[in-house]
Image: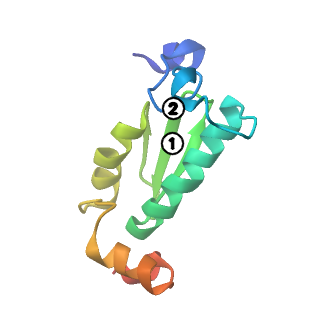
Amino acid sequence: MCALCGVLGGKGHWSDSASAPAAFAGRTKPQTRIRERQERVRLLNTVLKYHGVVAKDWSGNAYLLTSRTGRTAIVDTVAEIWPAAERLSGRICDPLDDGYLGGLASGREASTAAK
């Protein structure tokens, strides 16, 4: 899909409540698509920070990833974030990495464990 088509109306992802309202019927707080994406980006950045990558919402249809060195990638779905983050950081991005999880368990910021 070209960038313009993605901006004008890319398809929804299974994790978006708008594309599967029955799966999210038990939600008690009102949710908008924008708020949902903002929360998803916040959670992604919690993990990506450990790897030196930052994610931003791009026009509500894609994610813009940026490395510490300024390299960037645009991806359409959450599933595409991990391979792109690996290309940008030059290392494996595993949200279940022992160093990352150890930092979370000890209460210190996980990003300090990555060197």
Residue depicted at x 65% and y 37%: 27
41 in relation to 47, above or below: above
In the visual, does 102 lie left or right of 32?
left
81 in relation to 114, above or below: above
Residue 10, given in percent of the width and then of the height, sits at: 50, 17
Q: Which mark is residue 105?
A: none
Quarter of the image that includes the N terminus? top left
Assign a secondary structure to mark 1: strand
Dot 1 amino acid type: Leu
84 in relation to 74, above or below: below
Tell me if label 2 and label 1 are in contact, CB under 8 Å: yes
Residue 65, given in percent of the width and then of the height, sits at: 47, 48
Assign a secondary structure to mark 2: strand
Residue 101, given in percent of the width and then of the height, sits at: 36, 74
In the visual, does 59 lie left or right of 107?
right
Dot 2 amino acid type: Ala
Q: Which residue lies furthest to the right in this view?
A: 30
Residue depicted at x 71% and y 39%: 28
Q: Quadrant of residue 111?
A: bottom left
Quarter of the image that includes the C terminus? bottom left
Residue 30, given in percent of the width and then of the height, sits at: 76, 35
Q: Residue 64 carries which label?
A: 1
Q: Real-space Cα distance between discs 2 and 1?
A: 7 Å
In the image, 89 versus 23, the foreground residue is: 23
Picture colour scheme: rainbow
* Crowd rating for badge 2 (residues with CA inside 10 Å; few <14, some 14–19, many 20+): some
Q: Name the residue under label 2.
A: 62
Residue depicted at x 43% and y 66%: 52
